Image (cartoon, grey):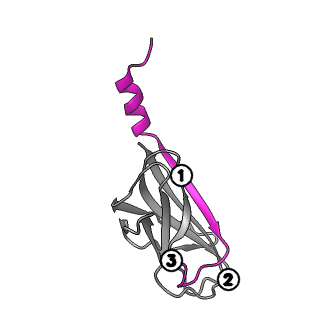
Amino acid sequence: MKDSRADLIFRKQLTEFRFCERVDSLSAIDDNFSLGSFPYAVTIKNVGCHCKGACSTKANLQLKDDAGNQMTHTTPVCSSEGVDAVYQQVTAGGNLSAGEKLKMDVTNNPNPETDEYTICGSYLAL
């Protein structure tokens, strides 16, 4: 039996994908840091991060779109090695157009700046 167009659209909207970006070091001047873009419209659903290194003061991250509009989410607390990340839900502003960049700002002064971060999240393809 052939799937109806409504069934295909419904399935596509329920498909959640993941993204991750590794960053060798972060500092307070890392504003408008690009996490990439998508070839289709998406809705960013959540964000979390891991910190590898001393991680004395972990980076505070704020997601935004290519135009600088901040997404609404609780600041993710980056986990240390061996500890699971706690993902924070994006509750508003998470829609990106096809080709639009997902960006982030660092809103504090991470210490040391040589720590390695992995920033991950999930999105829905629209």
**Residue at the (48%, 66%) spot, across then down:** 86
**Residue at the (37%, 71%) spot, across then down:** 74
Q: Residue furthest top?
A: 1
Residue 61, label in figure: none
Q: Which residues are magenta?
A: 1-30
Q: Which numbered disc flags the more N-terminal residue, 3 or 2?
A: 3
Which percent across, then down, holds residue 100? 47, 56
What secondary structure is marked by label 1?
Answer: strand
**Residue at the (38%, 23%) spot, across then down:** 5
Which percent across, then down, holds residue 1? 45, 11
What secondary structure is marked by label 2?
Answer: loop
Q: Quarter of the image containing the C terminus? A: top left
Could you say which is closer to the camera, residue 83 or residue 47? Answer: 47
State how far apart marks 2 and 1 are (Cα).
Answer: 26 Å
Q: Which amino acid lies under the numbered mark 2 shown in the image of this protein?
A: Thr
Look at discs 1 and 3 and give the one toward the viewer. Answer: 3
**In the shown orientation, is residue 91 left or right of residue 47?**
left
